[in-house]
């Protein structure tokens, strides 16, 4: 039963929703609305599970003084602090403390972490972009041309811009489209395998 | 140790130090970077310019503070353009950590309109901010049926039916287009669920590293425009005749790119010098 019920549910909803996509009638829309509500409810439970898991992992690390356990203290304290200051007693999401922390701690931290990317890209480019073979030379030239697009190069700006656009719209697009189609077909195949009960790994081992 | 050996084994902290220097330097030099708007950026601008006052547009500002530098300039320029055109703007965010940031951006632009356009767009009449809801795919699908399903209230807790500009506005059929500013995979949901399922007219603005991934959708006209990264943002600001932080940040980006290109050239020179030196040795063996 533990395996049959999920299999029946997945098959039923998989087939119904596939049919629903192509039948835009009123009852079909209502059914779709009903399913959307359910997905949201399940999603909320998943969120609760995620929070619980975060607390559990953090608590375990702190209790056993695992490697880098101090980070778990910061994570849990920050999480509970933001939940606390987000409560209406402290003014909620529009409250001063929540906004103060958001604007003066959270935004700078996120912006800093993202901006570090530029430094790693610079370091990685120095090491990785080497004309070791014909293929890596193509990669190197393409990268240089795309970078040159943002640099004012006087009379060369127009041709470089055009070459850059061509690279994005022709070779890049051909490769991306092939990948997208492959991913799409793979997605359909996987979905069919799950709906038909061939792929059962999501049920776990028990 | 020869020079090329040293260069090949260069400590990455040197790269960081030089880049830091070149990122800071342009802040003290007064110059501007010429930008030429490309077709995919111009198409978004032209589309909004072609709308009539009172038309509805949905701006989904789905990015977090980490991408603020690249996407805020587009958001500011586009919001101001929409307000100046007297469009009705529906804004929301599908980024968990973006709710407050987006709210402040929308308020900022609305407040600054008084100064530049002689009127202040009113919340509930000229624009609405729906706030954040989790699970972007579901929210986009839900809005396709009725905005009230995922957003029964706006960010401030006002029910959508009691907001003057939302009366009679049901779903995507009532908006002329959706412009999605994104720093993650929310754009995929907009393409797959918004455009493919509901036929929403869609355009995307995104971080520079993401842009190349979305050109297939542009060529197939599933999206009618792309604004990619700081360069795209600067181009949009230029089209709006509203130079802002992107135009300013382009100076830094130019310097950073020059440094990276120089490092790539040095790295390759060192590599080839090293190869020339080792080649005869191998032959002699």
Image (spheres, coloured by chain):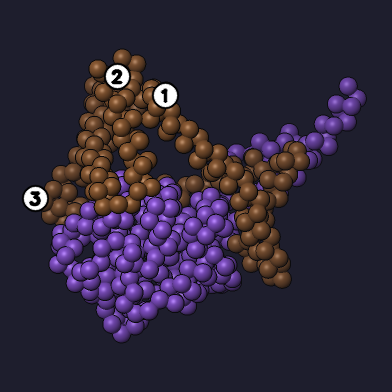
Chain colours: A brown, B purple
Identify the residue at image location x=25%, y=57%: B146
x%, y% of residue A187? 47, 36
State the separation of the CA atoms marked 3 and 2.
Answer: 45 Å
Comparing B254 with A14, the one in front is A14
Q: Which mark is residue A89?
A: 3
Q: Quadrant of residue B88?
A: bottom left
| Residue receiving disc 2 | A3
Question: Please, is residue A81 above or below residue A202 in the view?
Answer: below
Q: Earlier in the sequence, mark 2 or mark 1?
A: 2
Quarter of the picture holding the C terminus of chain A: top left
C-alpha distance separating marks 1 and 3: 48 Å
Q: Residue furthest top?
A: A206
The reply to whether the C-beta atoms of the residues labelled 2 and 1 are less than 8 Å apart is no
What residue appears at the point 49 percent right and 63 percent down from the top-left corner? B224
> Where residue A93 sits: x, y (%)?
19, 54
Can see residue B51? yes
The residue nearer to you, when weighing B179 against A189, is A189
Q: Would residue A54 be visible to someone looking at this image?
A: no
Relative to A36, say whether B169 is above or below.
Answer: below
Q: Secondary structure at mark 1?
A: loop
Give the left or right position of residue B136, taking residue B276 as reference: left
| Chain designation of label 1 | A
Q: Which residue is mark 1?
A: A199
* Sequence-first tag of 3 and 2: 2
Other residues around mark 2 within 10 Å, as few (<14) / some (14–19) / many (≥20)? few
């Amino acid at each position: 039963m533990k395996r049959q019920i999920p299999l029946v549910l997945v098959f039923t909803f998989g087939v119904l929703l596939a049919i629903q996509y192509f039948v835009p009638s009123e009852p079909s829309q209502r059914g779709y609305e009903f399913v959307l509500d359910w997905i949201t409810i399940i999603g909320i439970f998943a969120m609760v599970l995620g929070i619980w898991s975060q607390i559990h992992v953090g608590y375990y690390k702190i209790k056993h003084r695992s490697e880098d356990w101090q980070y778990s203290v910061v994570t849990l304290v920050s999480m509970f602090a933001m939940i606390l200051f987000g409560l209406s007693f402290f003014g909620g999401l529009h409250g001063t403390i929540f906004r103060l922390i958001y604007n003066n701690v959270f935004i700078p931290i996120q912006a800093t972490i993202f901006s570090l990317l530029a430094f790693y890209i610079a370091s990685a480019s120095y090491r990785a972009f080497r004309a070791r073979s014909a293929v890596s030379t193509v990669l190197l030239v393409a990268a240089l041309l795309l970078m040159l697009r943002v640099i004012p190069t006087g009379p060369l700006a127009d041709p470089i811009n055009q070459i850059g656009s061509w690279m994005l719209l022709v070779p890049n697009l051909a490769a991306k489209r092939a990948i997208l189609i492959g991913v799409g077909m793979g997605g359909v195949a996987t979905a069919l395998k799950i709906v038909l009960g061939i792929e059962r790994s999501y049920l776990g081992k028990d | 140790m020869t020079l090329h050996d040293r260069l090949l084994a260069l400590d990455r902290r040197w790269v960081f130090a030089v880049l830091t220097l070149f990122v800071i330097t342009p802040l003290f030099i007064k110059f501007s970077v010429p930008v030429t708007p490309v077709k995919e950026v111009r198409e978004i601008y032209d589309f909004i310019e072609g709308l009539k006052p009172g038309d509805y547009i949905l701006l989904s500002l789905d990015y977090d503070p980490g991408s603020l530098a690249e996407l805020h300039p587009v958001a500011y320029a586009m919001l101001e353009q929409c307000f100046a055109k007297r469009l009705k703007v529906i804004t929301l965010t599908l980024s968990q950590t973006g709710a407050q940031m987006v709210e402040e951006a929308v308020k900022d632009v609305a407040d600054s309109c008084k100064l530049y356009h002689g009127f202040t767009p009113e919340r509930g009449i000229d624009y609405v901010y729906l706030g954040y809801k989790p699970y972007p795919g579901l929210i986009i699908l839900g809005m396709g049926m009725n905005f009230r399903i995922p957003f029964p209230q706006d960010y401030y807790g006002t029910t959508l039916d009691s907001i003057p500009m939302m009366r009679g506005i049901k779903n995507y059929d009532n908006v002329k287009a959706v412009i999605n500013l994104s720093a993650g995979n929310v754009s995929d949901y907009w393409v797959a669920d918004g455009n493919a399922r509901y036929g929403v007219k869609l355009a995307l603005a995104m971080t520079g590293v993401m842009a190349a991934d979305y050109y297939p959708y542009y060529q197939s006209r599933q999206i009618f425009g792309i604004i990619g990264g700081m360069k795209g943002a600067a181009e949009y600001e230029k089209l709006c005749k509203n130079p802002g932080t992107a135009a300013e940040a382009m100076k830094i980006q130019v310097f950073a790119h020059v440094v990276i290109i120089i490092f790539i050239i040095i790295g390759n020179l060192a590599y080839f010098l090293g190869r020339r030196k080792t080649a005869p040795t191998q032959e002699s063996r």
